[in-house]
Amino acid sequence: MAFGSRLREQIAAQGTTPLIGVYDMYSASIAARHYDGLFVSGFGFAAAYYGLPDIGFIAWPDIVAFVQRLRGAFPGHHLLVDIDDGYTDPEVAGLVVETLERLGASGVILEDQQRPRRCGHADGKRILPLAEYLDKLEMVLETRRDLVVVARTDATEEQEILARAKALAATSADVVLVDGVRSVESIQRIQDVIGDKPLLFNQIAGGRSPRLSLAELSELGVDAAIYSTPCLFAAHEAIEASLTGLRESGGRLPSMDRAGAVGVEAATELLEKNLARTRPPEVRVTG
C-alpha cells in the first residue's frame, strides 16, 4: 500500500492519530521508538537547520533532502511534511509535492499565509486572498497521486476562520487544519462547518491552543494531532541543564550511574538500528 493511503486509513480509523514533530535524524530516531507517525515541523527544521525563527527562511530542497533521509531510515512510519505556503507560487508548490511523494512522504500541509510568514501560533499573521490560496491548493491536489493533503488556514478572526474552513472542506483536500485555534468551543464550531471532512489539531508548547490529551481530542471528533516541538523543546531544556551542570562541576562529566543516563553505548545502539533498516538485504546464491 502507498504511503499516502496508509496515512489516510490511519486518520480515518477510530481515535486521534498523533504525529510527532522532529527536527533532525537523531530526534526522529528517538520519536520513532514511541510513535508510528512523524511530522516534519517547519518550526523545528528552521531552528535546527538554520538557527532561525520560523518566518519563511526554509528552502524547499533542504526539506526534500531531510524527508529523503527520514524515509530511508524509517520505511514503516507515517511522514507528514509542513511545506509552509508551498514556497511561493503554485508551480513551485506542485513541484515540491511531486518530489516529496516520489521520495516517500505520506502527506503535506499547505497553508494560506502571505509572506513574510509567521509561526501559526504567533501574532502578525496575514493570509492570502482565498481565491489565490485555492488556486495553489488546486495545483497541489492535481499534482498529487496518493499523497495526503492537509489544507491549512491561519485566519484569526472567528467569521473568517469558519468561512475558510468551510471553503477548504469543500475541496478534495483530505484534511482541514485551522492553526492557532484558541478554545474547545472553537474546535466544535469548526467541526460544524466542515462536516465529515477530517480535522487536524496542532499542539505546540506555549502556543495559542488549549493543551488537550488524545482522549479529549478523540472525544471532540478530532481525527489527527501534530505535536510540533516536543523533541526540540525537550532538547533545549536538556542541553541547557547539561551544560550548566558541566560548568558548575568544573568540567567533570556526570556519572553514568544516574537514572536515564545516555552515553556512547546507548547512542550507538539507537543509530545502529537506522543503519540496519537502510542496509540492503543480503543476496544468497544457491545452486
Image (cartoon, grey):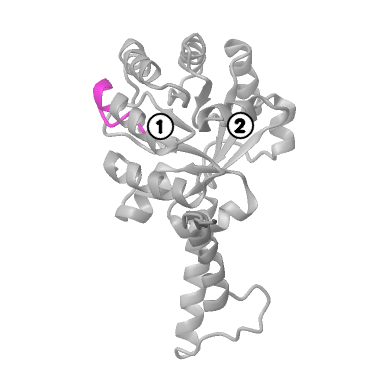
Residue 35 percent location from the top left of the image:
62, 47
Residue 127, how many percent across, how many down?
A: 35, 22
Q: Give the residues drawn in magenta, as a range.
A: 83-92
Image quadrant assignment for residue 261: bottom right
Q: Residues within 10 Å of mark 1 (few under 14, many from 20)?
A: many
Q: Amino acid at mark 1?
A: Glu
Foreground mark, 2 or 1, reads 1
Dot 2: few (<14), some (14–19), or many (≥20) neighbours within 10 Å? many
Q: Which residue is mark 2?
A: 224
Which label is found at residue 56? none
Which residue sits furthest front? 287
Residue drawn at x 53%, y 71% is: 267
**Residue to which mark 1 is pinned:** 101
**Is residue 263 visible in this depiction of the protein?**
no
* Dominant secondary-structure state across the stretch colored magenta: loop
Taking 275 as reference, is 7 above or below it?
above
Give whichever of discs 2 and 1 has the lower sequence position.
1
Secondary structure of residue under mark 1: helix
